[in-house]
């Protein structure tokens, strides 16, 4: 059944457009201009013998002269007094905290070069997401301020302290208000510093506001249960998850933790126990979470609240005044089905919504209470402190400023001039404040409106702490002296409030020894070693919902009507965060900018995602520029045809269109924050808008259709039902041709292999950034991605498949027969060098630059490579990358390698490759060698798990397992023995070293 | 002139020697004790004391006048006990430094007397010593001159001999002619002979075989030189740059037999053997100042360490005004090659000298090995893997034994020639 299912990477592949067919013939986007040269015009051009000789002579002379340079003298400068813990050449690891997750920071000779998850972290369990992996590059960012700024001029800390203290005193004596505006602060010490500051200046108030707000959930919980908290969701306890637009694997609240929990119910271990959770996703745009769902149904923003009300009613809740979803029969049917399944899975189910509307979240609470989720899959007693922003408080703050009541304001990790939906109102109001201080590390949109910019440390330079969830405390530890002249914001607040302790390190130590260390009986040293302290959790209470929903129903229906206005070119606009850029705070990180969106595979831009059928109706083609307009704001964006997008809707990502982010992040895409709407004191992520075609087109830098697979069957999937009948279902082992051109290789020692579980991979892209950091992979920029020259060694291929009942699409031209492209399913497949035992690339290399090792690795000797690119042409997996430029020494690629600050992030154990050579995944051979050496030095056997490759190490769901295939007890050997294992393009018998496990979908036949 | 100055120098030298010997003879009674005392002093005391200079403890010059002998004997034998006994002088003396002087119960009274005698006299370095040093330097320079002179002399002798032979030849030829003339045989004119000679050359230049031979010779010569030159491009065997500090491995590793890894500690554990940080130097050089060679002053080379660290010899503190030492790297592997010292030193147990040459005899270090890939590969092909007592190899060796019984297990056999062992 699976064998005739058609998978495709992009619409152009599915439709097999002429342009696509033409392009797919060539391995490289721009072939050598041989034909141009050899055609008549080329041959008849006058290139006289003399000119030829001149050029030849000059060339020879120039080359000789260039070669005549003296051998450079290398200096070797030892430490004067070497710190005891540093041995040059050996990395040190320190615990720290990124975004509430405990991490390990790898430093070499005193500079951090890689962030890895801390296995002790209760949220990540040793994994890390793409943003965390990329955060180390922000440390060296050259767009950051080198010195503090006072009144637009470079200044020093003494002058700033003097100035701020004087102004604060004036505000205090004048009885005016002082405001500290920040994104969510969950650091106990920062909170204590702010409390001390408030004690000194009693008119101070701390206002927390998040760029993407979760106020709706907090308010709803206050309303329903009297607890104004963000609960902790337990996806690892949920057998059935129904999500309404919550991208919990990508961006919603705590995606790293949720991914791990979610996959623990769907991975190999779970399948071997014949169990797998079921996940139904109702959403507008195709999110990472939706792409992983067992059943995904497009739903307009206006339908979300009503769908939830209907679900509540179907579950037996009392709702009066709701209406059926007249225009969405599929969703209506699915809700009935979901209700049935939810009733069956009471106590092990979870319903969530990504909406920030209090009314909608109240309905969600009602449903969950009905299902008995509280105490099992939702924990209100050990809440999450990851988001605590309050939209209404910020709006009130803008009003206060407008009324001239505020004399001093401090911005900590908050950038309202960019992130607030009404930036103009904010900036106008801000100009009435006398003292404006920003702790931003760069002159960003808000900081440039402030008199004082007191650049805060990067987290790798600073002491700090964090309390992301109840009972879990982590420490932030500096791993390098400040790169630029920055100072921690807390230190500034301590000095300005004339605290008795002005050293923030001392302050934290005092604070900890008073509270958490005393409670847990841990010492400071143990804390630094472990990175975190976990206090015993409270038992999760059961909560029942007893409110009457009439007013809520009215609000939801009113809001739904306002979204679905109708009319000419009317659309419902859905604003979302994408996985890489998120809210745009780290928009200046080139690693994140070049990380393809997990679903659309677009880099370096945001876009208007539209359903192909809807676009056809509007007369809009892919990459056309369109204008999206509301009463207040409009942007012009290129169109991306997104299968699975709800009809009549457009999705636009936040985090783009920054004007003062820095070299890489400024002027990338368009700002979507102004589309957010303040309704009932919370910011809503959807709005009614209109769309119209603008003139021109814009080519998005998409990695989507690069490296086509020529319609070969490289991803395999099955359903849970079939899997339970036959565990080998869908692996398609039948047609392997055993005939072989090559001799067998012996791997007497190790045999490094890898197993990738397609059912565990969510496609989040953390591995790509981890690989970038580990292997010094260049960032090539938007133009080069357009030319299909991205350098990522590991990519995640995203395949669409259409589920249209029995109408399986098996041929390219059958697309036109389909009624809609709504019902698509998605598979993510990490793809990197497969280290084939019989590698086709090795056979064609004329200089033996790529050869096989006795440990099963496909080796690449860069300095032997002469750049014929035959290997890339002959690679069936399209995983070889060619260095078109000297990315580390070319001012056109000023992303990070070509800069004396940012290049400090390079891994000294891996060479930077030169122009004209091939590169590809080496299976982190530097880690393999280091692991082996460390076993030899310790005179012990190499243990399974001693060596972890970068992608495996960071994977939030343990989808990638690496190890020694010669060791029958190793984790990877066991994984490869799974019945689900298949090898990509097994039929060509190149004997790849990477095995994949079939994707299993828990589908239910209606 | 030169010989006269040389003569003067040797005369002054001997005069100085005589005067020094007579001075020594005058002090001969104490000198005998002092010689024994010097030996003990060097063995037991120099870690903390100098005669002219304060080290950890105070400078000892004049200590014999400050304290009486009996007091000193008690103090040296067991200072801690002496202080504890409450002796007023001892308590005052102990206030010099928080570091208390160790007890030396193994020293006899006579030993201590000898030490005191030595301290009284100090090192035998009379006023003429610098002169002698100068003379020595001059001598060295002269030696260099002589050797050059000899070389030129030899050349001159050869040239003269050649000329003599030529002249003699000419004379013989003339004589022969005269003899022949006497015998009445006509002799051709000189010019004719000259003509003939050129004609021979011309004839030769028309000899195709000869030309071919010459051309072949040129091709072989230039070709082999070019070939050799190309192989040696980028190979810097013998590279011996001038280092900022004249550090002598010959003295430290050769004479003093300091273990290589005392300074290059990274070689055991890390990929870098690492040049020692200056605090490692200071482990010894806070008291080893070689001042005996420099008229009581710290050696100018050791002084460079102090300057780099901004080290104050009196307070024993490092200062703020530091300036790192910029050594010139001798062994440069290209970036594309990964080399790990610990693999070779700790795991394989290879002597440093295997690659770095007779380092213990090098006054200045030079690159001993070519550091070419061929050189690496050859060693990997020949060196047997030391797999005994290292369980890491158990499985590999077992697997290998299955394949090839009884053959040598070299690094190459275990994959030591594969690209990604060194290139990644």
Image (cartoon, grey):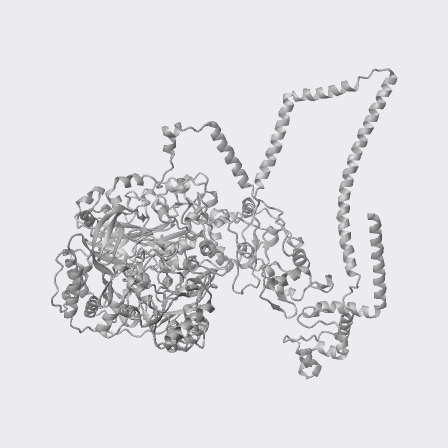
Residue A54 horizontal/vertical position (percent): 50, 31
Residue A842 horizontal/vertical position (percent): 41, 42
Is residue A918 found left or right of A998 in the rendered image? right
Residue A864 horizontal/vertical position (percent): 47, 43
- Residue depicted at 63% across the width and 47% down the height: B238
Is residue A248 found left or right of A557 in the rendered image? right
Q: Which of the 4 quarters of the picture holds residue A418?
A: bottom left
> Is A402 above or below relative to A643?
below
Q: Which of the 4 quarters of the picture holds residue B120?
A: bottom right
Is residue B209 found left or right of A868 in the rendered image? right
> Is B309 above or below relative to B422?
below
Asked whether the viewer can see residue B246, the reply is: yes
Number of dots carrying numbers: 0
Q: Which of the 4 quarters of the picture holds residue A360?
A: bottom left
**B115 or A83: which is nearer to us?**
A83
Is residue A807 found left or right of B387 in the rendered image? left
Quadrant of the drawing holding the C terminus of chain A? bottom left
Residue A5 horizontal/vertical position (percent): 23, 47
**A62 or A800: which is nearer to us?**
A62
Asked whether the viewer can see residue A962, the reply is: no
């Amino acid at each position: 059944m699976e064998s005739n299912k058609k998978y495709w990477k992009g619409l152009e592949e599915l439709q097999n457009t002429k342009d696509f067919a033409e392009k797919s013939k060539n391995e490289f986007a721009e072939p050598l201009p041989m034909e141009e040269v050899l055609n008549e015009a080329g041959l008849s051009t006058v290139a006289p013998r003399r000119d030829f000789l001149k050029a030849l002579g000059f060339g020879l002379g120039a080359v000789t002269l260039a070669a005549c340079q003296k051998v450079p003298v290398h200096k070797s400068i030892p430490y004067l007094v070497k710190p005891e813990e540093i041995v040059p050449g050996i990395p040190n690891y320190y615990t720290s905290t990124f975004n509430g997750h405990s991490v390990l920071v790898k430093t070499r000779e005193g500079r951090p070069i890689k962030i890895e998850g801390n296995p002790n972290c209760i949220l990540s369990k040793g994994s890390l997401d793409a943003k965390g992996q990329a955060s180390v590059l922000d440390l060296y960012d050259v767009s950051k301020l080198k010195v503090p700024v006072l009144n637009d001029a470079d200044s020093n800390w003494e002058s700033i302290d003097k100035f701020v203290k004087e102004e604060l005193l004036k505000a205090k004596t004048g009885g005016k208000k002082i405001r500290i505006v920040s994104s969510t602060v969950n650091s106990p010490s920062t909170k204590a510093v702010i409390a001390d500051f408030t004690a000194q200046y009693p008119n101070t108030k701390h206002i927390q506001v998040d760029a993407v707000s979760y106020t709706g959930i907090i308010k709803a919980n206050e309303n329903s249960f009297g607890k104004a908290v963000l609960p902790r969701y337990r996806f690892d306890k949920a057998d059935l998850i129904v999500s309404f637009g919550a991208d919990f694997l990508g961006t919603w609240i705590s995606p790293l933790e949720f991914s791990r929990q979610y996959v623990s119910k769907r991975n190999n271990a779970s399948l071997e126990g014949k169990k797998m959770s079921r996940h139904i996703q109702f959403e507008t745009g195709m999110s990472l979470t939706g792409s992983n769902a067992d059943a995904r149904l497009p739903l307009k923003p206006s339908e979300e609240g009503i769908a939830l009300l209907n679900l509540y009613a179907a579950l037996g809740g009392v709702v009066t005044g709701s209406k059926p979803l007249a225009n969405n029969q599929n969703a209506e049917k699915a809700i009935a089905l979901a209700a049935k399944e939810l009733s069956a899975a009471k106590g092990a189910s979870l319903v969530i919504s990504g909406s920030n509307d209090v009314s909608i979240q109240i309905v969600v609470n009602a449903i969950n209470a009905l299902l008995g989720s509280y105490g099992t899959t939702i924990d209100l007693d050990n809440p999450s402190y990851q988001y605590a922003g309050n939209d209404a408080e910020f709006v009130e703050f803008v009003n206060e400023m407008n009324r001239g009541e505020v004399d001093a304001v401090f911005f900590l990790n908050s950038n309202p001039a960019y992130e607030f939906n009404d930036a103009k109102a904010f900036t106008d109001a801000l100009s009435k404040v006398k003292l404006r201080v920003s702790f931003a590390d760069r002159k960003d949109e808000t900081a440039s409106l402030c008199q004082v910019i007191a650049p805060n440390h990067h987290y790798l330079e600073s002491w700090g702490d964090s309390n992301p969830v109840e009972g879990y405390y982590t420490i932030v530890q500096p791993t390098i002296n400040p790169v630029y002249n920055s100072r921690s914001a807390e230190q500034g607040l301590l000095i300005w409030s004339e605290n008795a302790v002005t050293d923030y390190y001392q302050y934290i130590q005092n604070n900890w020894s008073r509270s958490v260390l005393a409670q847990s009986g841990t010492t400071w040293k143990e804390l630094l070693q472990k990175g975190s302290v976990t206090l015993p959790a409270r038992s999760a209470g059961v909560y029942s919902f007893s409110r009457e929903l009439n007013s809520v129903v009215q609000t939801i229906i009113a809001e739904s009507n306002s979204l679905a206005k109708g009319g000419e070119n009317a659309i419902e606009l859905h604003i979302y965060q994408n996985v890489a850029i998120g809210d745009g705070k780290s928009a200046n990180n080139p690693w994140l900018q070049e990380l393809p969106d997990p679903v659309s595979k677009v880099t370096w831009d945001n876009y208007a995602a539209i359903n192909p059928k809807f676009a056809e109706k509007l007369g809009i083609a892919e990459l056309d520029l369109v204008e999206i307009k509301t009463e207040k704001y409009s942007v012009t964006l290129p169109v991306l045809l997104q299968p699975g997008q709800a009809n009549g809707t457009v999705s636009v990502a936040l985090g783009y269109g920054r004007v003062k982010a820095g070299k890489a992040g400024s002027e990338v895409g368009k700002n979507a924050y102004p589309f957010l709407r303040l309704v009932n004191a919370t910011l809503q992520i959807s709005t009614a808008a209109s769309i119209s075609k603008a003139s021109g087109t814009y080519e998005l830098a998409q990695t989507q259709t690069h490296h086509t697979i020529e319609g070969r069957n490289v991803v395999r999937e099955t359903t849970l039902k079939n899997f339970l009948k036959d565990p080998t279902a869908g692996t398609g082992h039948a047609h392997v041709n055993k005939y072989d051109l090559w001799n067998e290789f012996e791997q007497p020692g190790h045999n490094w292999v890898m197993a990738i579980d397609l059912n565990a991979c969510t496609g989040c892209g953390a591995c790509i950034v981890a690989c970038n950091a580990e292997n010094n992979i260049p960032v090539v920029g938007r133009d080069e991605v357009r030319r299909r020259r991205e350098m990522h060694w590991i990519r995640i291929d995203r395949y669409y498949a259409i589920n249209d009942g029995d109408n399986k699409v098996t041929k390219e031209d059958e697309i036109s027969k389909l009624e809609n492209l709504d019902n698509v399913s998605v598979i993510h497949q990490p793809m990197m060098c497969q280290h084939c035992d019989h590698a086709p690339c090795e056979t064609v290399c004329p200089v033996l630059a790529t050869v096989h090792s006795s440990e099963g690795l496909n080796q690449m000797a860069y300095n032997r490579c002469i750049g014929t690119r035959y290997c890339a042409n002959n690679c069936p997996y399209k995983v070889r990358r060619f260095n078109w430029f000297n990315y580390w020494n070319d001012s056109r690629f000023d992303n990070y390698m070509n800069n004396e600050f940012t290049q400090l992030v390079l891994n000294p154990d891996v060479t930077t490759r030169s122009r004209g050579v091939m590169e590809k995944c080496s299976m982190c051979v530097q880690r393999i060698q280091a692991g082996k050496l460390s076993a030899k030095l310790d005179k012990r056997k190499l243990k399974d798990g001693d060596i972890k490759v970068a992608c495996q190490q960071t994977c939030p769901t343990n989808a990638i397992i690496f190890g020694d295939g010669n060791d029958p007890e190793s984790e990877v050997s066991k994984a490869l023995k799974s019945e689900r294992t298949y090898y990509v393009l097994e039929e060509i018998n190149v004997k790849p070293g990477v095995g994949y496990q079939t994707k299993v979908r828990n589908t239910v036949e209606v | 002139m030169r010989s006269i100055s040389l003569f003067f120098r040797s005369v002054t030298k001997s005069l100085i020697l005589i005067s020094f010997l007579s001075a020594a003879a005058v002090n001969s009674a104490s000198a005998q004790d002092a010689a024994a005392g010097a030996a003990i002093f060097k063995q037991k005391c120099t870690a903390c004391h100098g005669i002219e200079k304060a080290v950890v403890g105070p400078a000892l010059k004049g200590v014999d006048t400050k304290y009486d002998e009996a007091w000193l004997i008690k103090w040296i034998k067991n200072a801690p006990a002496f202080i504890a006994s409450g002796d007023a002088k001892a308590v005052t003396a102990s206030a010099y430094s928080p570091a208390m002087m160790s007890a030396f119960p193994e020293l006899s009274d006579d030993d201590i007397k000898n030490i005191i005698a030595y301290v009284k006299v100090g090192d035998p370095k009379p006023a003429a010593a610098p002169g002698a040093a100068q003379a020595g330097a001059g001598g060295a320079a002269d030696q260099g001159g002589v050797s050059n002179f000899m070389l030129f002399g030899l050349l001159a002798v050869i040239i003269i001999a050649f000329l003599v032979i030529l002249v003699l030849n000419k004379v013989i030829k003339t004589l022969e002619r005269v003899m022949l003339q006497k015998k009445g045989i006509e002799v051709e004119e000189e010019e004719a002979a000259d003509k003939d000679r050129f004609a021979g050359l011309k004839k030769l230049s028309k000899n195709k075989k000869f030309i071919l031979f010459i051309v072949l010779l040129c091709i072989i010569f230039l070709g082999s030189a070019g070939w050799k030159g190309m192989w040696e491009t980028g190979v810097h065997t013998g590279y011996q740059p001038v280092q900022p500090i004249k550090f002598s491995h010959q003295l430290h590793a050769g004479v003093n037999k300091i273990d290589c890894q005392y300074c290059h500690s990274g070689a055991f554990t890390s990929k870098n053997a690492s040049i020692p940080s200056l605090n490692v130097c200071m482990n010894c050089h806070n008291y080893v100042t070689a001042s005996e060679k420099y008229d009581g002053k710290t050696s100018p080379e050791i002084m460079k360490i102090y300057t780099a660290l901004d080290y104050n010899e009196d307070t024993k503190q490092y200062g703020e005004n530091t300036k790192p030492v910029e050594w010139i790297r001798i062994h440069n592997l290209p970036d594309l090659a990964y080399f790990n010292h610990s693999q070779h030193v700790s795991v394989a147990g290879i002597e440093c000298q295997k690659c770095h040459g007779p380092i213990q005899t090098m006054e200045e270090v030079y690159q001993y090995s070519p550091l070419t890939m061929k050189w690496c590969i050859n060693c990997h092909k020949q060196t047997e893997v030391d797999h005994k007592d290292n369980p890491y190899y158990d499985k590999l060796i077992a697997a290998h034994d299955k394949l090839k019984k009884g053959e040598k297990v070299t690094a190459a056999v275990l994959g030591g020639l594969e690209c990604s062992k060194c290139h990644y």
